Image: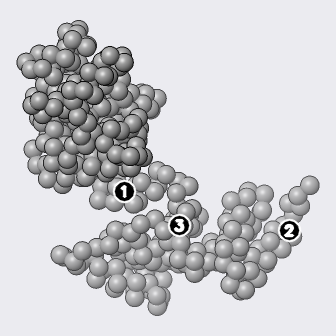
């Protein structure tokens, strides 16, 4: 049975102090954090303040700035008059490149402790960086494996840095997922989160930007060429009407980019939409068509055409979320390895998505 007496907590606290003095910062930090998190440790108010102070010194020595930020915020919640907590928070924000936030934290630290020597120096540094214009700022990579243990915080801090704290999608947004077979997985997860989502179970046939471009063309205009006629033969007018209605009711469209390779006719180079997977159909496909990995430029044009069509079908100005499906190629006729072909395929789509997001001015692309 664990000893939960105050003496036991004192012993653990003193042991943590010894570890810190020996520069065994990681061990000391974990022991301090354990004491602070354990309601049975029965630390006094003074010990809690000291535990936070020593834990922050350890995390600072380890240069674990994300953890330092978390500890500093916890110490401030524990004691709102904690000048050192605000100082350490400011330092961690400076180290993470969040200078405007650092200025606010360090200003508060100086208000609480005007005689501080460190906080004014950090504040000067934060203000210098915050006021700089035109100078590129380094966006850091999450350097510690422990940062990946909290995916939400990781994404907010390292992926959505330019939108930090800014709502992207309203709570009452109506979603529609299209693109590849992975769109159904996204729809299911969104529904589990309580969101309103429209999706159509199409399968793996509509998994390229070419297929989706012609699918949206069919939804808007019906069968007007060989590709849209093949889509109509495969899915029928009832699905077309359903998808038109769903597009009109939605305002956030999640487009999953599936694969870059497509089949094209050998005689004229036109995109070929193929549904049947029978041996005879495959033999005809391979004899009369060529499999080709489409270019970044082709996919950019297709994505832009898809968004243009959706904008005409939707009743409200739509927002677009571009994603790349993790589902790999099932096989390749182009290369000796489907693994390599899939890597090229996903890289092509990711580059296309990046170019669309960087250059698109007419539509709201997230």
Compute the Cα span from label 1 to label 3: 15 Å
Q: Which residue is drawn at 34% across and 84% down?
A: 125
Q: In which quarter of the image is residue 279?
A: top left
Q: Which mark is residue 8?
A: 2
What residue is pinned by disc 1?
159
Question: Of helix, strand and loop, which one carries label 2?
Answer: helix
User: Please, is residue 61 above or below residue 217 in the view?
Assistant: below
- Tag in front: 1 or 2: 1
Of the two numbered discs 1 and 3 on the same chain, state the one appearing first in sequence: 3
Of the two numbered discs 2 and 3 on the same chain, state the one appearing first in sequence: 2
Q: Quadrant of the N terminus?
A: bottom right
Of the two numbered discs 1 and 2 on the same chain, state the one appearing first in sequence: 2
Tags 1 and 3 in contact by the CB under 8 Å rule?
no
**Few, some or many residues within 10 Å of mark 2 (<14, 14–19, 20+):** some
Q: Which residue is drawn at 21% across and 43% down?
A: 294
**Few, some or many residues within 10 Å of mark 1 (<14, 14–19, 20+):** some
User: Please, is residue 322 above or below residue 19 in the view?
Assistant: above
Q: Where is residue 346 in the image (x, y as percent from the top left)?
A: 33, 47
336 horizontally vs 48: left or right: left
What residue is pinned by disc 3?
144
Q: Which residue is drawn at 41% across and 60% down?
A: 157
Compute the Cα span from label 2 to label 3: 32 Å
Q: Position of residue 308 (x, y in %)?
A: 11, 35
Q: Where is residue 178 in the image (x, y as percent from the top left)?
A: 28, 30
């Amino acid at each position: 049975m664990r000893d939960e007496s105050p003496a036991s907590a004192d012993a653990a606290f003193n042991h943590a102090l010894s570890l810190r003095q020996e520069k065994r910062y990681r061990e000391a930090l974990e022991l301090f954090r354990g004491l602070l998190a354990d309601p049975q440790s029965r630390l006094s108010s003074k010990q809690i303040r000291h535990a936070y102070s020593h834990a922050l010194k350890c995390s600072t020595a380890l240069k674990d700035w994300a953890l330092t930020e978390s500890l500093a915020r916890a110490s401030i919640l524990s004691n709102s008059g904690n000048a050192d907590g605000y100082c350490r928070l400011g330092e961690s924000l400076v180290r993470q490149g969040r200078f405007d936030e650092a200025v606010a934290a360090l200003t508060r630290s100086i208000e609480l402790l005007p005689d501080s020597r460190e906080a004014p120096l950090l504040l000067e540094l934060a203000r210098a960086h915050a006021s700089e214009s035109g100078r590129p700022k380094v966006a850091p990579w999450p350097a510690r494996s422990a940062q990946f243990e909290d995916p939400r915080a990781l994404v907010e801090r390292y992926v959505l840095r330019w939108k930090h704290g800014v709502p992207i999608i309203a709570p009452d947004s109506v979603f529609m997922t299209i693109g590849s077979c992975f769109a159904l997985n996204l729809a299911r997860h969104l529904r589990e989160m309580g969101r309103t989502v429209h999706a159509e179970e199409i399968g793996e046939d509509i998994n390229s930007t070419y297929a989706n471009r012609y699918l949206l063309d069919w939804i808007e205009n019906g069968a007007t060429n060989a590709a849209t006629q093949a889509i109509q033969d495969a899915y029928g007018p009832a699905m077309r009407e359903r998808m038109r209605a769903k597009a009109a009711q939605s305002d956030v469209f999640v487009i999953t980019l599936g694969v870059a390779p497509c089949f094209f006719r050998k005689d004229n180079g036109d995109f070929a939409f193929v549904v049947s997977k029978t041996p005879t159909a495959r033999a005809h496909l391979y004899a009369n068509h060529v499999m080709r990995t489409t270019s970044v430029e082709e996919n950019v044009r297709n994505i832009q055409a898809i968004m243009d069509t959706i904008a005409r079908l939707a009743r409200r100005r739509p927002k677009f979320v571009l994603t790349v499906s993790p589902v790999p190629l099932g096989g390749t006729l182009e290369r000796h390895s489907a693994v390599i072909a899939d890597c090229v395929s996903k890289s092509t789509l990711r580059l296309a998505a990046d170019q669309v997001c960087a250059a698109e001015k007419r539509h709201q692309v997230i």
